[in-house]
C-alpha cells in the first residue's frame, strides 16, 4: 500500500512482513490442532445431555414468556395440581397397612435402629387408627382419612418412595426441586418454562399457601431458581390475595385505563431500542400480567357464585377455622384450574420454624392428637376437590399429585407418643390424567420401615410426573454454570407401570 499513514499503528504492524509471517504461522498451527482434534472426535460439539441426546429447549418469545407451548410428545395431562403436605405424613397410619405392626406392638425386634433422627427409638407401635378395606378394590386405609378413603378406586398409590434426607427443609427442597440444596427451580417452574400457560390473564403457576403461612423451605418450594424469573410461582390464597390489586381511592377507572395505555406505549418504544434484551422483555411482560391480574384475580377469588352444595361438600362452614380456610383454598385451586392455570400447588401445612404437629404433620409427640388435627383440616376439603374435578370432567386432562417429603417410623420415639422421620419408606398417590385407577405400586417391608419392592426415588417420581405432562425429563434442560441442568439431575426413570 503506497500511503499507509491513515492506518492505525496496529494496522501498520500487520503490514510488516515479519509480523505477518509470525501471525500466519500461529494461525496455521491453530488450524492444524483443530484438524487433529476433529479427527479424534475431541472438538466440542453441540450441547448434549448426560445420555448424549440433544436438549429440548422451549421456544420462548421474550415478549410473551407465558404463551402456550407444545409438549415434547402427546400426553394426557395438560395441567397439574400438586397437593403438598409439609411435615411428613405417617404412611403406616394412613395408606400403608402393615399387619405385622399389630403382632409386634410394644416389642422391639432385632434389626431396628437404636437411634433415629431425633434420638433414641422406642418400641413398635401399631397404627393409631383402625384400617378397613375400602371401595371395590378393597384397599386398606385407616379411619384417619375417611373422605379420601372413599375415593381409593380412583387413586394410584406409590408405596415404595424413598428420599435422600431426614431433615424437613432439605426434604421439601428435594421433593419440590430435585435437589436438597437451595437455588434450584421447582417442579412447577420447570413445567411452566416448558409449556407456558393457556390463560394470559392469570399466572402460569400459582402456589396456594396454607392459611398458617409458608412451609419450612418457604418460597424455594415454588421458586424459579436459575430459570428466568417469569416462571416462579405466584403465591396467594383465599385469605390473602396478591398485594396492590385495587386502584387507589382517588384514581378513577378512566384515568387508570389511560395510565395503563401510556405505559404500554412507553414500554413498547423502550423495547424497540433493545429488541434482544430478554430480561427487559420479561419484566415488561410481568408488569403487564400484573395489570391484567387486577381484574382477573378478584374474579377468580370470588366464591360467592359457588352453590350451597359445593360449599357444604368442601366443608367451608364446618369444623375448625383452619379447616374452613383450607377448604376455601381448595375451591380456589379448582377455580384456577378451570381458568387454565398450568400448575397449581396447594399446601396443607406451614411453619418455617418447625411445628411439632401443630402447624404441619411433623408429629414427634402425641401423634394421636396432632395427626388427627391435621387430618381434620385436610381430609374433607381435599377429597371434595378431587371429587369436584372428577364431576366436572377435569381429571381427563388434569394430573393430581398428593405428596409429602418422607414418612414416619413404625416404632415410637423414646417419649412413647410420636414417630420420628423415615426417609426410607413413604407413600404418595396420583390420580387423574394418564394414571391407573385403583392401583398400588411398590411395597415397603413388613414393618413399613424400608422400601422393599420396586423401590422409587424422588428422581423417578419427578421423571414420571414430567412424562405425564408430555415432557422428557432427560432432555428438558437449562444450561447453567457450564452444566445442562434438569429437574432429575442425572438420575430418574419413568415408572411406566403406573401409566394407564
Image (spheres, rainbow, N blue to C red):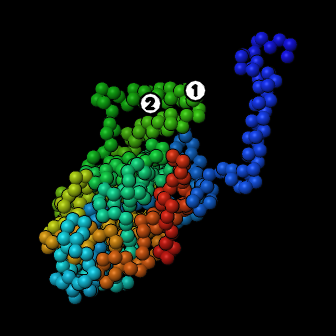
Label 2 secondary element: helix
Image-quadrant location for residue 52: bottom right
The reply to whether residue 170 is visible in this rendering is yes
Q: In the image, is residue 268 above or below residue 309?
A: above
The reply to whether residue 198 is visible in this rendering is no
Q: Which mark is residue 309?
A: none
Q: Is residue 232 left or right of residue 74?
A: left
**Quadrant occupied by the N terminus:** top right
**Disc nearer the start of the sequence (2/1):** 2
Q: Residue at x 38, y 59 (%)?
A: 174
Q: Find the distance from the CA under tag 2 to the CA under tag 1.
A: 20 Å
Residue 18 is situated, as x and y percent measured from the top left of the image, at 79, 25
The residue nearer to you, when weighing 339 against 91, is 91
Q: Residues within 10 Å of mark 1 (few under 14, many from 20)?
A: few
Task: Give the label, 2 or 1, closer to the camera.
Answer: 1
Single out the residue that lies furthest toward the right.
2
The residue nearer to you, when weighing 364 against 89, is 364
Residue 403 is situated, as x and y percent measured from the top left of the image, at 35, 65
Image-quadrant location for residue 444: bottom left
Single out the residue that lies furthest toward the bottom.
103
Which residue position holds label 2? Answer: 260
Amino acid at each position: 500500500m503506497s500511503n499507509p499513514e491513515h492506518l492505525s499503528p496496529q494496522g501498520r504492524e500487520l503490514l510488516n512482513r515479519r509480523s505477518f509471517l509470525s501471525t500466519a504461522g500461529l494461525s496455521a498451527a491453530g488450524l492444524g490442532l483443530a484438524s487433529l482434534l476433529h479427527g479424534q472426535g475431541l472438538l466440542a460439539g453441540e450441547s448434549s445431555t448426560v445420555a448424549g441426546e440433544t436438549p429440548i429447549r422451549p421456544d420462548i418469545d421474550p415478549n410473551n414468556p407465558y404463551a402456550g407451548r407444545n409438549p415434547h410428545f402427546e400426553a394426557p395431562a395438560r395441567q397439574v395440581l400438586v397437593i403438598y403436605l409439609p411435615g411428613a405424613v405417617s404412611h403406616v397410619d394412613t395408606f400403608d397397612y402393615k399387619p405385622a405392626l399389630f403382632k409386634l406392638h410394644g416389642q422391639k425386634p432385632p434389626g431396628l435402629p437404636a437411634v433415629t433422627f431425633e434420638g433414641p427409638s422406642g418400641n413398635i407401635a401399631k397404627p393409631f387408627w383402625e384400617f378397613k378395606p375400602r371401595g371395590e378394590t378393597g384397599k386398606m386405609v385407616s379411619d384417619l382419612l375417611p373422605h379420601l378413603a372413599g375415593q381409593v378406586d380412583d387413586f394410584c398409590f406409590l408405596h415404595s418412595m424413598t428420599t435422600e434426607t431426614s431433615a424437613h427443609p432439605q426434604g421439601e427442597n428435594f421433593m419440590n426441586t430435585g435437589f436438597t440444596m437451595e437455588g434450584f427451580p421447582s417442579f412447577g417452574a420447570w413445567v411452566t418454562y416448558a409449556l407456558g400457560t393457556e390463560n394470559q390473564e392469570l399466572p402460569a403457576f400459582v402456589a396456594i399457601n396454607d392459611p398458617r403461612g409458608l412451609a419450612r423451605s418457604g418460597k424455594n418450594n415454588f421458586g424459579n431458581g436459575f430459570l428466568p424469573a417469569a416462571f416462579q410461582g405466584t403465591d396467594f390464597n383465599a385469605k390473602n390475595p396478591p398485594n396492590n390489586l385495587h386502584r387507589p381511592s382517588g384514581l378513577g377507572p378512566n384515568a387508570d385505563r389511560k395510565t395503563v395505555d401510556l405505559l404500554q406505549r412507553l414500554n413498547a418504544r423502550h423495547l424497540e431500542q433493545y429488541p434482544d434484551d430478554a430480561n427487559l422483555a420479561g419484566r415488561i411482560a410481568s408488569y403487564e400480567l400484573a395489570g391484567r391480574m387486577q381484574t382477573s384475580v378478584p374474579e377468580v377469588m370470588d366464591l360467592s357464585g359457588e352453590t350451597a352444595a359445593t360449599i357444604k361438600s368442601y366443608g367451608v362452614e364446618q369444623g375448625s377455622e383452619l379447616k374452613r380456610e383450607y377448604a376455601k383454598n381448595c375451591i380456589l385451586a379448582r377455580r384456577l384450574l378451570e381458568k387454565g392455570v398450568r400448575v397449581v400447588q396447594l399446601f396443607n401445612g406451614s411453619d418455617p420454624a418447625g411445628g411439632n404437629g401443630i402447624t404441619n404433620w411433623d408429629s414427634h409427640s402425641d401423634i394421636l392428637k396432632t395427626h388427627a388435627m391435621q387430618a381434620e383440616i385436610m381430609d374433607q376439603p381435599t377429597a371434595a376437590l378431587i371429587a369436584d374435578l372428577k364431576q366436572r370432567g377435569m381429571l381427563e386432562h388434569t394430573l393430581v399429585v398428593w405428596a409429602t417429603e418422607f414418612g414416619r417410623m413404625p416404632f415410637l420415639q423414646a417419649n412413647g407418643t410420636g414417630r420420628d422421620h423415615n426417609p426410607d419408606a413413604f407413600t404418595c398417590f396420583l390420580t387423574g390424567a394418564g394414571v391407573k385407577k385403583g392401583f398400588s405400586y411398590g411395597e415397603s417391608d413388613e414393618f413399613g420401615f424400608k422400601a422393599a419392592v420396586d423401590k422409587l426415588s424422588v428422581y423417578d417420581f419427578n421423571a414420571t410426573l414430567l412424562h405425564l405432562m408430555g415432557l422428557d425429563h432427560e432432555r428438558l434442560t437449562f444450561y447453567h454454570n457450564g452444566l445442562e441442568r434438569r429437574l432429575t439431575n442425572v438420575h430418574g426413570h419413568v415408572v411406566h407401570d403406573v401409566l394407564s
